[in-house]
Amino acid sequence: MNAKLSQQPDTFGFNGNRTLAQTSPYQILLRAGSHLKLLKQVHAHIITTGRNHHLPLLTKLATSAISSGAILYAQKLFLCAPTVDGFLLSSLITAASKFHFPLQTVLFYRHMLARNISPTNYTYTSVIKACAQLQDPRTGRVVHCHILTNGFSLDQFVEAALVSFYAKIRELKFARKMFDEMPQKSIVSWNSMISGYEQNGFADEAIMLFAKMRELGVQFDSATLVSVLSACADTGALELGSWVHDYVKSNPISLDVVLGTALINMYAKCGNVRKAQGVFELMDEPNVMAWTAMISGYGMHGFGKEAIDLFRLMINQGIYPNEITFVAVLSACAHAGLVQAGREAFAIMKNYGMMPGTEHHVCMVDMFGRMGLLSEAYHYIKDLFPVQPAPAVWTAMLGACKLHKNYDLGVEVADNLFAAEPDNAGHYVLLSNMYALAGQMERVEMVRNAAISKELKKPAGYSVIEIDQKAHLFSTGGMPHPESMAILQFLDELVQQIKAAGYVPVSEAIMHELEEEEKECALRYHSEKFAVAFGLLKTRQGVPIRIVKNLRICEDCHMAIKYISLVSKREICVRDKLRFHHFKDGSCSCKDFW
DNA sequence: ATAGGGTTAG
């Protein structure tokens, strides 16, 4: 609205009283758009012409102020208003919610209740959305009660807002119950539910619900597909992701920047960075998120130079990078060993008014550490003082000490990590390995005792491989795969073959198993070896094998899979917690910076 | 005289 005028504020103004006198105050307000300065001029005009008791004018003025971001101004207007009616309050509520002032939305709602003004379904959608943004379950539930008692629980919009609210406060079971019980499910409620699953880490449920949507013949839209693509990216479901892409191409769904970015992200995280590139290159006007997704995609595949070049191109095109862009760039430099480029990128952050945060620190330490610049990495951490390094920074440093076999420094770093986050079970293997390597057996014992007394369990590693659109999961924890005997037999043969080719198992550092039970299923092989063997058994020669793993790949599996790619003449692509490893002809794209 | 909703990307 008024885009033309709002882009040219200089052309607006009070050029003499004649213009003013001929224009109605409301018209002037509309023309002011969402320019606070102009709005204030109009406000002054309203006052000087004695119209500041006029509620409709004040209402429009207040909502315009909110749209310009001036929530305080709007609140003052409200407090100074001679009278208040339902119209003013509901306008304030919807505007405050729409322009992301959730706290004020709820405050205005309280005013509404205090004045015995009856809310409408419009009011409730805005207020519930605000509660979701605030992550405020209590207020949200109270408002839900108001909805029930006032008879708005069957309103399509209100219901969708409630499903979205419960999903966003991670009450997914309840959200699903509401969703299932809705007699009329709008497309937005489907989308809310699917996105709720995906955002909370339940990608499989998101995909299953989408499957149900298709089964029932429910129409879906671009927002649905965006969430589905994110779910595909989470689980590495390339086949479904590609289906979505094909669907978009052959149906009248516009490939806008959001959908395009979701596609880039999906292809990159499913191992096909060239396809991601193809989507990016076809985008009309990629914004900062699209550029960042592409840079990040290059980075996780080890294409550091491509990432840097794209970043420079982005800057040259006048796209303003944000914090996440810099994480993508620095991480790309770390994974490709581009120390100098990383330093330069880090240095220009301040030109964009940004302070490096934890994730940037982790990237820098990781980058120096991987390249063996341990002392530089360590000084980087020390120079953060008085900022206390986050545990993730110590983890990166510890990994570097292990990689470059500096056990003295490693012990010191491990002590810091243990002190910083004694309850994180994910660190225990790394910690006890480092202490064991340094011969500090009493510290190994300490970690072990801490784990036992706090009943901490290290997260179970698993690997997933998608075959004929079906995901097969291999895990040290849960259920064994139905064909595990045959797979194990094949794997044993495979290991004999790669040993003959020169593979020597990398002996694990002395590992203290935390529990006997774990030792029992401490199978001969990690899950990724199982998944690779299964993939070789189930797919034809020439078909690349793609594995998604939840933890980082270990040195031994990395070595073994290099040899497997050699003897089986197969391309094997493993996505681990941090990055991709493309194995081919006996070597890996990560250049052994696993 | 006045306005307005729930879902989606890095």
Image: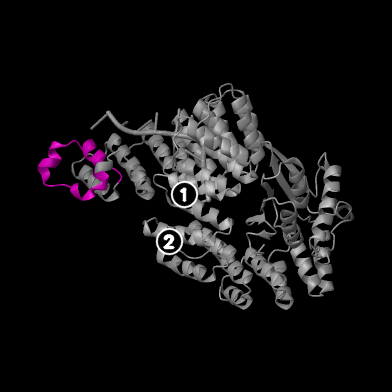
Q: Amino acid at mark 2?
A: Arg
Residue that carries the numbered disc 1 in the rendered image: A290
Q: Are marks 2 and 1 in contact (CB under 8 Å)?
A: no
Q: Residue at x 74, y 74 (%)?
A: A411
Residue that carries the numbered disc 2 in the rendered image: A312
Categorize mark 2 by other alpha carbons within 10 Å: few (<14), some (14-19), many (20+).
few
Q: Amino acid at mark 1?
A: Ala
Q: Chain of mark 2?
A: A
Q: Residue at x 39, y 46 (%)?
A: A285
Q: Which residues are magenta?
A: A5-34
**Residue A141 appears anywhere in the view:** no
**Residue A344, position in %: x, y?**
47, 69
The answer to whether A524 appears left or right of A223 in the picture is: right
The answer to whether A354 appears left or right of A480 in the picture is: left
* Residue A317: quarter of image: bottom left
**Residue A106, position in %: x, y?**
48, 41
